């Protein structure tokens, strides 16, 4: 990261004109480029001028990969429900883009704790866990209580009523009594994918 | 309830003069009386005029028991941490006052899920579970996911920072994806003890 | 519940592909299936592959009934206004799906208390009351003050201005001074229908 | 009002020096003076320099009455619980100070609706009703639904947890579906006493 | 009011089927009918079955007037800006429907205080003032400071940013230090029109 | 400012040891020093080691003046009520410390608009106005509507109930429709005194 | 300003009929006119009747310039990101309309502090800085810490999740510990452009 | 961690009886013990029964060290102001207790960015940075923008007014646009010290 690994563009809310200019800019300098929170329309505009651009509709990620990416170590990305998968994919694909191996463990929410318990062996192998959950948001705390690696908690805006667009899960995660947990913004899969890659890299290479 | 089982007085914020008058009123009519949220000072004032009054400092409950209470069925009262015990005791002693057997299962919070798992057999025997938790407030949802009896969730104001005096745990509980859970006010042990007794009574006696 | 009675799918926000796969899954295993918060579009997609699926537009409920359902006991579902009916129907139809008899008592809000008073005899016959209200949300507290059975309060997002999408009615219900009331999430008819069925079942069958 | 009827001083938070100066000022000009939200300490300081000052500890009101007050018409001041009485007294004594007859109807909260119903005849005689309630705050709406005179609703900060210092009752009252209700600030007995007196005066004297 | 003066239907969020049934119901009983918060589409549906129904697009009000309405007394309806006029018209037309004369004084917000000062003579003639304002919401307090009649304050959701859909103006009005002011829900022109008519009627007829 | 004019210490929450060390530090370097939000206890500790320190109890300001201060131009500091004076004095004394002439115009709140109107000539002479108000917070907007100089608005935490510790006045000020107004933190007299001095200096000396 | 410099119309939410009437009104009186927050549709309607009207789609500003505008002094308008540019342009074009020279320094957010540091010389030349930022909103505080001219901070609603439509950046700016900063409403480029022009004018012309 | 490294007790709110029992429990099992958020009174009670207990008043930490602790790697703990030091010390001493070397870099807040810039070389050497800040809370984002190691952000409740007990800094940190940042609860130095030690350990030892 920050040494030729690739550049990131936050696409949401940018005008087409601005967006294309920024993509072309990076593209000319031969970087790998990651665009987040892009709509399909934005992607199609970018694709017109940069034909090797790829798009994942689920996560809203645009990728332009010029130099092949070597993946190291392991990050586990977990979700409470299936509706959290778009955010989880933003995290997973960000981590992969920056060179981490990712194992996906989806739909293991705490309302049916045995699904989670049956996956703990896989989760324990990772250097860092990204735990994504909406509604009550209890998943990261329960995982953090069972492992001794850092857990990056991602609240999602999935839910309704007293969920208040993710506020409920955000607060749950900030208040977790488990040891070894920290939190990113609601729906911020990118942020979680990025910092978990920093940690994964430290685990594999040390502070080099 | 509502048929000679006993009367309830919410003591907090009442002037001594008012409070004593209300207690004497009920006492003369030979009811069992339950006072909630009473300070030690309030109890001592009441004790001066009604010598058989008893006080539990942990829960802040004053009790005057004139007719002996027969206990039926079973309610499980659980807490996430030790700091939630005062609220749990308000629930437990309210339930006992109105004639329920209570089993106490304290300090089984989800940050160390195995403590909870090891107690599930006891919890499953109850007709109704009162689950008390502060901070992240995930306990009731995890329990509700493992049993098919009603869970009454009680958020507590235990915590700091983004807990916002119990708001965090309240929202967690309202947003729980588990089936069979409903919620009372922050720190409202009394309310949970009362409704769980209604449910326990229905389970033992039916709609008689 | 949890023993062949049927499975539940939360449809809102799921992709068509995911949704159909989950429905087919349960369908093959010969369960009764309940889908909640489904749009008409979602229903039509499901109907294409599972022809016996039924849909109720008012409540957004999809039902696939393979084994006939025996109904027992009685739950009263009440609303403050006519705009609360969709949420009330989600509660009522959930309760019926899981085997409860339901009596519907709609539009008896407290701003015209005599409408409510004239229905109290019907309400008193139920083992459990689900009280649904938006705007000021006072209905559940007033009912709870008149009966000695559990009241499950459901705030709705009906209203405008300082209602804040149901926050006002949610807070009213949590703060009710009446005895025997607990609360589910804003607009969560399903949750209320489910726990009231648990209670109704205990009243009819005991803890069997 | 505003024509020699008397002057009002909001005492809370004023320094002793400031407070005494303002009281002396009015006193010299031979007005009747009403001080609200005064502590006992403040009263004693005022008493030292103005010996005819009177104090009511419950409501925190200081009164200096130089010209006798003729009372007209009728205002009903109602409360949900006994803990709301201090605010109700602020309203009642303000209304009396400005020349209204007041009838007090306390502890008629909606959690026991029959207490309220039995008082409706008295309430109906008033030109205007001040309805004071904490916790769930449903009283004003229920009263407004039964009468065709204006109801001034006063939320109080009585309660705990999700009451949020009176926010819950404030929102309840603002969202009431009953016709003929408007709301003042949390704990603002003074404001309710004042505007209800304006209305009472209009009813007795017309727009003179 | 409440004696043949007319009936009110809150149209927003009602299904066409429900809405038409309620309108027909009242129509058959020969009441004047007022529908509030109605869309143009709703009106056209109603018009199909009740041909004398009229609609005002600005305020969203449907009116069916069978018995002619005599107007008495005077209410002043004021707004801060031109964007507040729809809410003000809901208030004014409600007041007229229930038999009050209304004088409209629009666009006199406090950011240009002289516009307001030049209108004070007109405002002073009314028995009651309805003051409607968005954004900062200071208008009602400034008016109340200059008159000795009741001011009914209506916050509107006009504004952006830290206005939070009318919360800002609502809080301003609740906190006004002026004497003789009370507040209805955000955008609740109907509520203000109704209670001001009750007051106007008391001023003209007394408590008859 | 920032060139030998003086240094500022925010005293609140600092330990005595820390505080004294910082004061001594600046003192030795022969700066004028301004301490804000200091308690009397803190001042006495400072006084022990720096005898020329002065204290103003109303504003909580400690001053050590070594080089005499020349005052230029003019800032008007206005308040809505007398309870806002401590914050206003923090602003006024900060402005004077940094070299501005200050005219104080207190207790001219909008609930009695004529008090304010009678002072407008004085206010118009200033290069910049600091307008301090609690409760409804409407003063700055009304002033800004009458002058064409910048108005720095200071919300105070004076009030109760729906004031929410100054939130109400803060929102009012941010939403003001008047031209030429900007806002500092609740109770931040220091910040207002500082930026108004920057503006005053520009007006007198230009961008030198 | 306020002396023939031009008139301002807040277009958002006004009906076409109202809007055109107001524009024509000013136009006839031969003022320069500035319309803010106008949609393209609104502009086209205005253009039909006033052919010299111009529109800037980015900022939503309509301009009718009849008397040529002389620009004086200098205001620096800075943004944290490219998504803040629409709000910044509202500020810049407002300042230019009222006669200030403006230098634009965009996309210098604090997450890459060296971009900002490299522009400080330009920023230091201005009489006043308008600093526009969304998300974390730290830009104004960092700038204010490096200069001794007033900084007008404009929070934007750019962001997602715990940004809560600009609340996060608003709070950041209000809490800045830097000296010489005050804040306008979220997305209020107009307000910042206006007050910074007042300051710029004072700096160039003094209090004339 | 979790393998004999030591046990943690959250002391705040525990009764003396409970607290001592827990300390004795761990002490007997020959663990190193860390008590957080302990008052001096609590420490003295513990000291009576466990004489080797040590206390740090600034951070509120009780330590009982039985097995000597080897420290590895490096964590940088930074603060914005001096008032944030107690929380920073909780983080630093927690990290040291669990075996990390810690470098402290205090009072480098962004309102004077050059203080921070001059320390960047030290900060860059660490495997992980804990950045502690109150008020505007911008420090962690600015640091994260300059380094490629993980930054754990700790908002503090230092500030007043629109800080809302740390909410402002919490939101700032969650919304930071910098890459490589995640957040713990307000004032939760313990949580930051713990997770940064997990990361530091991974960096030194890998996933062993
Ligand atoms: N701790 C409590 N929390 C909430 N409500 C309570 C509590 N204790 C008693 N109550 C209710 O308050 C009523 C008594 O209130 P009061 O008349 O003010 O003493 C009882 O009938 C209960 O319904
Ligand atoms: N615009 C409005 N805002 C608030 N309440 C209203 C409004 N219009 C009508 N109402 C109230 O809602 C009641 C009718 O509600 P409903 O039975 O749902 O049509 C009326 O009797 C009025 O009290
Ligand atoms: N009352 C106050 N409110 C807000 N900020 C202040 C106040 N007094 C001083 N400051 C700022 O706080 C800085 C000093 O903070 P500190 O280094 O913690 O003493 C000063 O340079 C001012 O910018
Ligand atoms: N200052 C703190 N803030 C948040 N959590 C803490 C703190 N100190 C300890 N903990 C957590 O609380 C647990 C102990 O809680 P308890 O069993 O109540 O003593 C520890 O294992 C930690 O995970
Ligand atoms: Mg862990
Ligand atoms: Mg269950
Ligand atoms: Mg009951
Ligand atoms: Mg009525
Ligand atoms: Mg008045
Ligand atoms: Mg102005
Ligand atoms: Mg500066
Ligand atoms: Mg970084």
Image (cartoon, coloured by chain):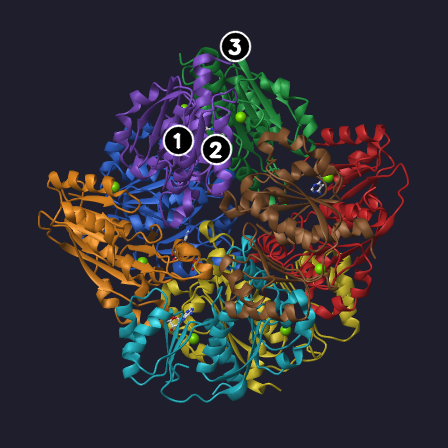
Chain colours: A purple, B blue, C orange, D yellow, E cyan, F red, G brown, H green
Q: Which is nearer the eye, B143 or A184? A: A184
Image spot of residue B204 (x, y percent): 19, 48
At numbered mark 2, what does the secondary structure look like: helix, strand or loop?
Answer: helix
For the residue pair F29 and C181, the one nearer the viewer reads as: F29
Task: Look at mark 2 in the image and give the residue it sits on.
Answer: A23
Cα–Cα span, label 2 and label 1? 10 Å
**Residue behind mark 3:** H70
How many residues crowd around disc 2 within 10 Å: few (fewer than 14), some, or many (20 or more)?
Answer: many
Q: Quadrant of ligand 6?
A: top left
The residues bearing labels 3 and 2 have C-alpha atoms spaced at a distance of: 49 Å
Answer above or below: position of G138 versus E34.
above
Residue H11 screen position, x and y as percent: 50, 30
Residue that mark 1 sits on: A53
User: What's the residue at 48%, 15% (across, down)?
Assistant: H203
Give the letter of the chain under mark 1. A
Element assignment for label 1: loop
């Amino acid at each position: 990261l920050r040494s030729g690994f690739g550049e990131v563009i936050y696409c949401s809310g940018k005008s087409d004109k601005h967006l294309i200019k920024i993509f072309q800019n990076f593209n000319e300098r031969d970087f790998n480029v990651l665009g987040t929170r892009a709509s399909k329309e934005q992607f199609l505009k970018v694709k017109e001028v940069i034909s090797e651009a790829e798009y994942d509709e689920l996560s809203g990620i645009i990728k332009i990969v010029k130099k092949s990416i070597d993946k190291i170590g392991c990050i586990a990305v977990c979700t409470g429900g299936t509706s959290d998968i778009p955010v989880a994919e933003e995290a997973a694909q960000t981590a992969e883009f920056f060179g981490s191996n990712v194992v996906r463990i989806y739909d293991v929410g705490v309302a049916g704790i045995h699904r989670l318990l049956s996956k703990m062996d896989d989760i324990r192998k990772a250097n860092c866990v990204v735990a994504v959950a909406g509604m009550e948001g209890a998943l990261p705390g329960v995982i953090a209580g069972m492992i001794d690696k850092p857990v990056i908690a991602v609240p999602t805006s999935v839910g309704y009523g007293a969920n208040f667009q993710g506020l409920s899960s955000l607060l749950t995660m900030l208040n977790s009594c488990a040891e070894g947990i920290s939190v990113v913004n609601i729906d911020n899969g990118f942020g979680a994918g990025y910092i978990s890659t920093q940690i994964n890299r430290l685990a594999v290479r040390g502070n080099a």
